[in-house]
Amino acid sequence: MAVAQPWTPSSWRALHALQQPEWPDPAAVDAVRERLRQLPPLVFAGEARALRRALGEAVEGRAFLLQAGDCAESFRDVSAVAIRERLKVLLQMSAVLTYGATLPVVKVGRIAGQFTKPRSALTERLGGVELPSFRGHAVHSDERTPEARVPDPERMVQAYYQAVSTLNLLRAFTKGGFADLTQVHTWNQEFVASSLEGRRYEVIANEIGRALRFMQAIGIDLGDERTIHEVDVWTSHEALLLDYEEPLVRRDSTTGDWYACSAHFLWAGERTRQPDGAHVEFLTGVENPVGVKIGPDATPDELVALCERLNPHRTPGRLTLVTRLGADRVREALPPLLRAVRETGVPVLWACDPMHANTFVTPSGHKTRRFDDVLREIEGFFGAHREVGSWPGGVHLEITGEDVTECLGGSEGVLEEQLDHRYETLCDPRLNVRQSLDLAFRVAEMMRAA
């Protein structure tokens, strides 16, 4: 009988890896991987373990996951202002959810590593010219020329240093006073404050402030309460570009276990979630919390196989299944998947990605999503869990801190003819701040009902 070989960071190479760039110079890729292998880790094993514990609380219904951020991060967008605005909307949404549903919120950003994107086609037609599809700044440029779309492995090094800069700023903001709960009013952007969502947020901010003053008035010393003055915001991205992920795996000196040190949380996408595929093989060997995106064609048997492969030790918080089923299909498609996974006994955190299966292209050529479809999918997600008797543990969203016009609708709705005003995404459309806050209020209501 064949003896199973021990896992190594390069074990995935024995399998066919989908969605990988066709590097023109393999020797250059080898050299870049070696350089990345010598660089310090971006995150640490202890941090990943802390996130796994927090997600374990969400598995048991004692917390809720808010995972949100850019569709695809840009090498051109690493300023302190841009990162602060992204953090701001995440903090606002978290405050709304925590206050509205009285549950801790685990805050995970799609940040400091979301530099690649899977694509459904090898080429795309732009301005009458057919070009290789844009796969993210860690692979090539988004400029619309054949030369710019040639994969360049040096960009993986640039992605690493961009992630370093982003993480430094993120840690400074979250631990240096900006995320202090006493600053809850300052998180409301000027262009949002006068809107319906901004006014609703100010009501909550006022009530939080009053609660803090009450605690002080009765003699509770808030000065030493870390959770009042600091927050944990974890990083995540799709583990798509395996030539980048492999050299950033490190063995933890205290446990001897392998950890992916490119982010606290990694996931396999809908196009790369094959139980016997290279991406799942890579994720099996790292001890980080990991996720898998689940589309409408997923079967109960596939999910059972993924659960057994990715969480064989039944560790709470280890595995998150992120469903992206579509507003019209979620209510029917999700319950059989929930029941099949429950029967395995594998603890799983279920989260809803209401963005990707509700994307369409307008007659003007803009890829967009309707806010109402996004909301309907989340409502269907909660309804399916209510039917089965399980906990709807989180949401996974593409949002931005900017006043963009990329998704249609919301309480102060973006119209189709307004998409041109500020359509800035590198790939998929994102909810703007007003739409994100609107959604947070709606989700908080669903959480209370659940």
Image (tube, helix red, strand yellow):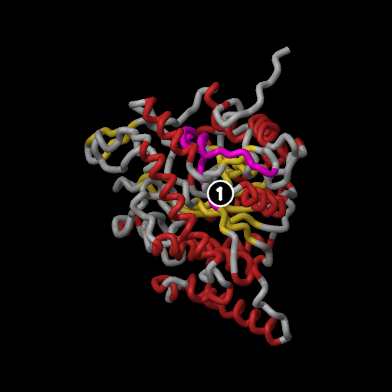
What residue lies at 34% left-to-right and 38% top-to-bottom? Answer: 140
- In the displayed structure image, the side of residue 403 where residue 219 appears, left or right: right
Residue toward you, 58 or 32? 32
Quadrant in the picture for residue 273: top right
Q: What stretch is highlighted in magenta?
A: 235-254
In the foreground, 333 or 405: 405
Farthest top residue?
1
In the rendered view, would you say 58 is above or below 122? below
Percent x, y of residue 276: 60, 25
Residue 378 drawn at (x, y percent): 58, 53
Residue 74 in sight from this viewpoint: yes
Quadrant including the C terminus: bottom right
- Kind of residue sitting beneath label 1: Val
Foreground: 259 or 364? 259
Image position of 370 (left or right of 300) = left
Query: Disc 1 designates what residue?
Result: 43
The image shows residue 187 at horizontal and vertical percentages of: 49, 71
Where does residue 344 sit, x and y in percent of width and height? 75, 36
Quadrant of the drawing holding the N terminus = top right
- Residue 384 appears in view: no
Within 10 Å of the Cα at label 1, are there few (<14), some (14-19), or many (20+) other Cα atoms? some
At horizontal 48% and vertical 65% (from top left) the residue drawn is: 88
- The picture quadrant where one finds residue 292 is top right
Residue 178 vs 368, above or below: the answer is below
Determine the residue located farthest toward the left in the rendered image: 128
Disc 1, SS: loop
Residue in the picture at 33% in, 54% down: 423
Residue 143 belongs to magenta span: no
Q: Nearer the viewer, residue 75 or 39?
A: 39
Query: Is residue 237 in the magenta section?
Result: yes
Residue 220 drawn above or below residue 401: below
Res 119 → quadrant: top left
